[in-house]
Image: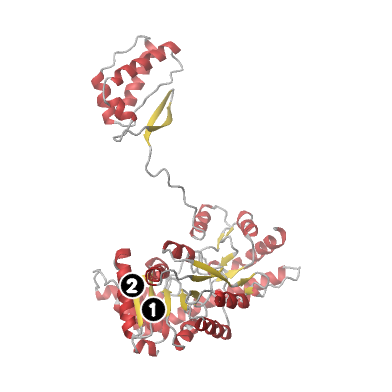
């Protein structure tokens, strides 16, 4: 700042007199030490070229007599500084800026899901609709906090519970409750103590622990991932250095399950591969295997000695029934198979921000379960030390209180029912408005909060650019963010995009 004041003063005096000013070396040195962003050149449009050059030469001579000149242009490591031009009125300065050690780091692309919400917020159109992020909304399209969650939180306040660290494996009451919800409280695998469970940072963190376990103790093992799958699955396994490949899942011709392709790819995988399966409400397609198809999938995985790995993010939220949505996992457990299961409570309890979930490993013996749990704790310790307590206590309180538990089931049925209702209304509007005879029945065959519309990237872009409807570029829409009042508008946008954009 001292340098800028001095320069302004210098120029002002030059307007009054062409006489060169005497510059004290001590003042220059003090100013430059106070401000490392040193001014180095002046552009003086109202002064004659010869006078301006004289001032520059004089300044250079004075600066060279001290170390301030060097420290202004070079860092401590004698690295040259880059130059940026700043204009202040009639004065133009070239400012020295030290090159960053992070200059080689490029800008990361926006997240394909969370980036949708950022774009939505920036849109000022009153018709805009956010169908990108999978978060439940009311009919008024507002976030919803379950009533039973509020009651569970009030119970925590009444008890005056502290905020001490949890053990590495998390809250014991939560771990017990979450394993019982998943496998069923009377399941022999729990009574035999063959399940290793630790609390994780929702579904994502739980998947990440499992990925690290695979990388460490099954070196070289490949994991098979459905095509398509949730956008973060590949990131998780890439960062854990677990190789992956895809198995066929979605059939664009039928907008349904490519079951034959799925079975063929699982059979062709190297023996002992991990197979990532969506327990219910497949994300992004909303297409689930039938009970008979689940039996066939289990047959092939057993024949190939593969390792089933379930991602269960929507238990109770898809059908409205906790037991029905866990049936695929329980089928594999009943066959005596060892398996991995990641759980999340973001959707079914609306605990998006609490980051509460779990990773379960069903082992062939209690001894194996003890050892596996010890190693998962070892992985978690340097990763995040121990998990947060608030969300875990909510889950434990809801599941552990019969009245709360029944109220939770009622609220899940309500949320699942609202999504089913808008799914039906969207189908009705699509069928009545589209005069081409296109079959839109796949919308009803899908389940859960998502619908895979079959729209390609260009068509999805049209949904956003023309209709202000925000969605992921693979054509997925979240019906949890749709209201009954907006179904007709959405149907118009889908029909226009499908038929008029190639």
Left or right of 282 in this view: 64: left
Left or right of 312 in this view: 466: right
Q: Position of residue 134 (x, y in %)?
A: 50, 67
Proximity of marks 1 and 2: CB atoms separated by less than 8 Å: yes
Q: Nearest the camera: 109 or 80?
A: 80
Examine the image and state in which quarter residue 349 appears: bottom left
According to the picture, the residue beneath numbered tag 1 turns out to be 361
Left or right of 370 in this view: 295: right
Tag 1: Cα neighbours inside 10 Å, few (<14), some, or many (≥20)? many
Examine the image and state in which quarter residue 353 appears: bottom left
Quadrant of the drawing holding the N terminus: top left
Q: Is residue 151 above or below residue 15?
A: below
Q: Position of residue 156 (x, y in %)?
A: 29, 74
Examine the image and state in which quarter residue 456 appears: bottom right
State the residue lying farthest toward the right. Answer: 436
Q: Position of residue 430 (x, y in %)?
A: 68, 69
Residue name at image x 44 percent, y 84 percent: 337
According to the picture, the residue beneath numbered tag 2 turns out to be 376
Q: Nearest the camera: 73 or 94?
A: 73
Q: Secondary structure at mark 1?
A: strand
Q: Is residue 448 above or below residue 499?
A: below
Q: Is residue 49 above or below residue 72?
A: above
Quadrant of the drawing holding the C terminus: bottom right
């Amino acid at each position: 700042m001292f340098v800028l004041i001095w320069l302004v003063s210098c120029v002002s005096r030059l307007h009054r007199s062409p006489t060169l000013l005497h510059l004290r070396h001590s003042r220059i040195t003090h100013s430059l030490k106070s401000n490392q962003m040193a001014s180095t050149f002046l552009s003086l449009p109202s002064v004659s070229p010869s006078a301006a050059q004289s001032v520059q030469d004089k300044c250079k001579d004075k600066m060279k007599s001290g170390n301030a000149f060097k420290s202004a242009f070079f860092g401590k490591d004698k690295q040259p500084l880059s130059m940026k031009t700043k204009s202040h009125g009639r004065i133009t300065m070239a400012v020295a800026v030290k090159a960053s050690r992070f200059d080689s780091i490029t800008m990361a692309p926006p997240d394909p899901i969370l980036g949708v919400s950022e774009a939505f917020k920036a849109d000022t159109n009153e018709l805009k609709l956010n169908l990108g992020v999978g978060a439940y909304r009311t009919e008024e399209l507002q976030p919803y906090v379950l009533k039973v969650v509020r009651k569970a939180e009030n119970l925590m306040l009444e008890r005056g519970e502290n905020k001490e660290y949890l053990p590495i494996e998390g809250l014991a009451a939560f771990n017990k409750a979450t394993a019982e919800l998943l496998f069923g409280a009377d399941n022999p695998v729990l009574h035999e103590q063959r399940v290793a469970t630790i609390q994780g940072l929702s579904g994502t963190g739980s998947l990440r622990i499992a990925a690290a376990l695979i990388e460490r103790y099954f070196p070289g093992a490949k994991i098979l991932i459905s095509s398509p799958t949730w956008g973060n699955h590949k990131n998780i396994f890439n960062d854990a250095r677990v190789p992956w490949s895809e198995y066929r899942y979605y059939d664009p011709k039928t907008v349904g399950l490519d079951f034959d392709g799925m079975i063929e790819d699982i059979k062709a995988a190297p023996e002992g591969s991990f197979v990532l399966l969506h327990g219910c409400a497949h994300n992004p397609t909303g297409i689930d295997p039938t009970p008979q198809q689940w039996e066939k999938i289990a047959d092939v995985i057993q024949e190939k000695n593969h390792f089933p790995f379930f991602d269960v993010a929507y238990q109770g939220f898809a059908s409205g029934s906790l037991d029905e949505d866990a049936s695929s996992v329980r089928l594999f457990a009943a066959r005596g198979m060892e398996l991995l299961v990641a759980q999340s409570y973001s959707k079914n309890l609306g605990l998006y921000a609490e980051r509460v979930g779990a990773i379960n490993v069903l082992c062939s013996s209690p001894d194996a379960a003890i050892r596996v749990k010890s190693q998962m704790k070892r992985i978690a310790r340097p990763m995040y030390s121990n998990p947060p307590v608030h969300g875990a206590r909510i889950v434990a309180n809801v599941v552990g209180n019969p009245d709360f538990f029944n109220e939770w089931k009622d609220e899940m049925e309500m949320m699942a029912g609202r999504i089913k209702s808008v799914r039906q209304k969207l189908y009705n509007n699509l069928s009545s408005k589209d005069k081409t005879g296109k079959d839109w029945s796949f919308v009803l065959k899908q389940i859960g909060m998502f619908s895979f519309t079959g729209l390609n990237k260009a068509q999805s872009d049209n949904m956003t650019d023309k209709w202000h409807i925000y969605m992921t570029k693979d054509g997925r829409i979240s019906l949890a963010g749709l209201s009954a009042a907006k179904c007709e508008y959405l149907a118009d946008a889908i029909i226009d995009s499908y038929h008029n954009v190639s």
